[in-house]
Image: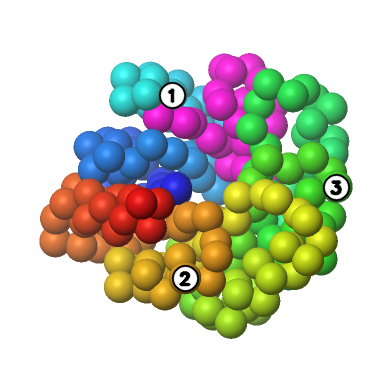
Amino acid sequence: MVQFITHYTDKYSYLDSVRIALDGGCQWIQLRMKETDANTLLETAIQTQQLCKAYHATFIIDDQVELVKQIEADGVHLGKNDMPIAEARKILGNNFIIGGTANTFEDIRMHYKAGADYIGCGPFRFTTTKKNLSPILGLKGYADIVSQMRKENINLPIVAIGGITKEDIPSLMGTGITGIAISGSILRSENPIEEMKEIQNIIQSWKI
């Protein structure tokens, strides 16, 4: 599983980043637009949703539970300071995907009990695309978390996030995680579409 989290740069708009990821074969887009006015967010969300439908990709919106319900996106991703997962589940019901951000095994256990469908776990390393970072996990952090999950029979997809590059993927997947979330490293590459294709191929090789 490769998740792409939208990112705005001097070179690419949010929608540009969505198109790049989809053209590179990514099948999971998370629209993340912090500190954006409601009208711009709604407009971008609808356009992103149309693109995702055209590419048969899953469309998740960061934080905005009511917007997810309004436009019938596929789901929502909730950070540590966003709405609690259990509350979001009451609003959305069981037909929407709900993901939660975690930094520790205790976070994951809590999200699992609250009804999360997947976990965005990190950060792997320092990243400039997110403010107020939790403690860095590194490879050992993921391996320990996956081990604890197995001991308690918690079966949730774990997606690593935070400063991940193409070169990190083999060792990260070796920890037992399910997939990765990626953003800035795609858009900083010389050919972002090809970079996404290569990342998809690396992840696919782990499933064989």
In this rendering, which labeled residue sits more in front, label 3 or label 2? 2
| Residue 58 highlighted magenta (yes or no) | yes
| Residue 86 highlighted magenta (yes or no) | no
Q: Which residue appears at 22% of the width and 37% of the height?
A: 23
Q: Position of residue 18 (x, y in %)?
A: 33, 38
Q: Is residue 99 above or below residue 148?
A: above
CA distance for labels 3 and 2: 26 Å
User: Which numbered disc flags the more N-terminal residue, 1 or 2?
Assistant: 1
Q: Which residues are magenta?
A: 57-78
Q: Of the numbered discs in the image, which one, if any, rests on residue 113?
A: 3
Q: Position of residue 67 (x, y in %)?
A: 62, 26
- Circles 1 and 2: CB atoms closer than 8 Å: no
In this rendering, which labeled residue sits more in front, label 1 or label 3? 3
Q: Nearer the viewer, residue 82 or 163?
A: 163
Question: Quick one: label 2, few (<14), some, or many (20+) residues within 10 Å?
Answer: few
Q: Position of residue 26 (x, y in %)?
A: 34, 41
Q: Is residue 75 left or right of residue 107?
A: left
Q: Is residue 121 visible?
A: yes
Q: Which residue appears at 63% of the width and 17% of the height?
A: 70
Q: Secondary structure at mark 2?
A: loop
Q: Which residue appears at 70% of the width and 50% of the height?
A: 155
Residue at mark 1: 49
Q: Nearer the viewer, residue 26 or 9?
A: 26
- Mark 3 residue type: Lys
User: Which numbered disc flags the more N-terminal residue, 3 or 2?
Assistant: 3
Q: Would you identify the image quadrant in which residue 203 lies?
A: bottom left
Q: Is residue 83 left or right of residue 197?
A: right
Q: So how many labels did they put on this image?
A: 3
Residue at mark 2: 174
